[in-house]
Amino acid sequence: MKRLLLVAAAAIAIAAPAANAQVVRGDQIVAQSNYVSRQQAAIPQVSIIVRADFVLFSVRYETATRATDARGSELALVFKTVTERAARTEGMSIEVGQPGFSAAMETAAIKELIQDQGGDRSAIDIVLKVNVKEKETFDAVRARAEKFVKDTPLTGRVEAVIGDSQFLGVAEPKKHRDALIKAISEDVRLMQSSFGGPSSPVQVSLTGMEQRAQTRPVGPLDLEIYIPYSMSLRSGAGN
């Protein structure tokens, strides 16, 4: 018998600063979707808003079969079933670990993934990566993830639990850097024209531009991208 436990969670909630919820990994940035900060102190004036490329969902497969070897066999079979189904499903893929701290499933053997939960319970954690379709809502993305988990055949006493935290992700964040730099440069020119002139030029200095881009969720599928730079103005040609 198949068992599916869903932990409901709002797509957006007010919680800790987004800096604590962002993870940069190679060619992607992910930020926890239910960590939306209202603290503006560390956010520069200039940023861009982009639509998430994918959403990460945590899924735990857990079994309470009494025999240890049997628990391992059940989880191994379920893991094989899940990964094979994801490979056949357009726009979905599987990683191991937790959202934001996951790795390709090829990097770990099934025996390394099985966790002893105590009390005759064992589990494995996977990350379900769901690509966002054009004009799709967050609820629609979540519904696809839940359907995938619900429709996956389970073995023995294995139960599937979808976690209550999701991560929004941007693939290839460098592709947005040009637009962000352009917006910052336009803001610099605005400062120079607004506070200076031919007889009283204004020098604008930027620090921190070498830092990686940061993200924070600002909507169900929207991410704000910014570089945490600082700006200073000084009047005079070189004084």
Image (spheres, rainbow, N blue to C red):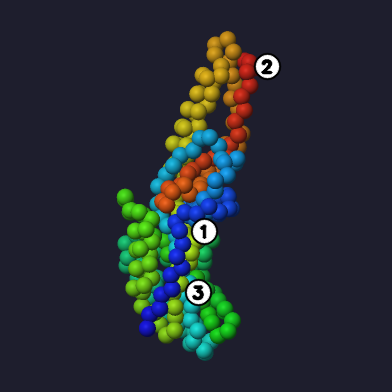
Query: Residue at coordinates 68% horizontally, 16% vertically from top-left?
Result: 239
Q: Residues within 10 Å of mark 3 (few under 14, many from 20)?
A: many
In the orientation shown, which residue stands out farthest toward the bottom?
Answer: 67
Query: Which sits in the foreground, 222 or 152?
Result: 222
Specify the amino acid type for callout 2. Asn
- Residue 69's place in the image compared with 168, above or below, is below
First in residue order: circle 2 vs circle 1: 1
The kind of residue on which mark 1 rests is Gly
Q: Which residue is mark 2?
A: 239
Relative side of 98 to 80, left or right: right
Which numbered disc covers residue 124?
3
Residue 186: x %, y % from top left: 48, 27
Per the image, label 3 sits on a secondary structure element best described as strand
Q: Secondary structure at mark 2?
A: loop
Q: Is residue 160 left or right of residue 67?
A: left
The quarter holding residue 44 reads: top right
Image quarter of residue 3: bottom left
Q: Which numbered marker is on residue 100?
A: 1
Which comes sooner in the sequence, label 2 or label 3? 3
Query: Which x, y percent locates residue 211?
Result: 58, 41
Of the pair 144 and 116, the residue shown nearer to us: 144
The residue lying at 49 percent from left, 43 percent from top is 225
